[in-house]
Image: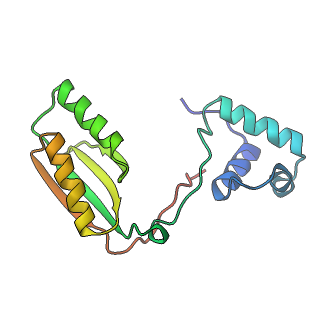
Amino acid sequence: MSARLDEMDRKILALLQEDASQSLDEIARKVGSSKTPVWNRIRRMKEAGVITRETAILDPEALGLEACFFVLIRTSEHEADWQRKFLQTLRERPEVLEAHRLAGDIDYILKVRVKNARAYDTFYQALIGQVKIHNVTALLSMEEIKSTTALPL
C-alpha cells in the first residue's frame, strides 16, 4: 500500500534523494517552508516507511571496483532449503549489490561489482562451490550509461 504524499512531501523527497546531507534549513528554504514543518514531514515519512534509510553513495571506480557484471542464473533447484542457502550465500557476498528473482527463462539476476575479471572468477568459483546452479551467464558492463537511486516521484 502506498503512502499518501502531497506535493510538499514529494519536493522534500526529491531534495533528499538528490542529497540527504542538506540541512533542514536548506530543504525548508527550497520548498518554501520553515524548518519545523519540514522536520515533522520527514519524521512522518520515516515512521510510515517511505524513507527507509540514509546512506552515502560511493564511487566504485575510485575504490578500484572497475568491473560491473550482470549475472544471469538458471537453477534446476526450487526447494525451500536450496533457496534459503542460495539467498544466504548472496547476502554474505559483498560483491553482490543487487539480486532479483525473475519471471521467465532466467531465475535470478545479480549485479556484481568487483575489481576485474579475475576477481569475478573468484566470486563465481565461490558461488558455485556453495550452491548448486544449473547455468550461469555473466555479462560485463562496458559502460554505465545511467545509474541512480532516485525514484520517480
- The residue drawn where x is 18% and y is 31% is 82
Horizontal and vertical percent for residue 15? 70, 55
Residue 74, visible in the rendered structure: no
Quadrant in which residue 26 is drawn: bottom right
- The residue drawn where x is 59% and y is 49% is 55
> In the image shown, does 1 or 83 lie closer to the viewer?
83
Q: Is residue 151 above or below residue 86?
A: below
Side (left or right) of 130 relative to 41: left
Residue 117, visible in the rendered structure: yes
Horizontal and vertical percent for residue 92? 34, 41
Horizontal and vertical percent for residue 41? 77, 37
Q: Is residue 87 above or below residue 17?
A: above
- Residue extending farthest bottom: 142
Side (left or right) of 148 relative to 93: right
Side (left or right) of 22 relative to 34: left
Quadrant in which residue 42 is drawn: top right
- The residue drawn where x is 47% and y is 63% is 147
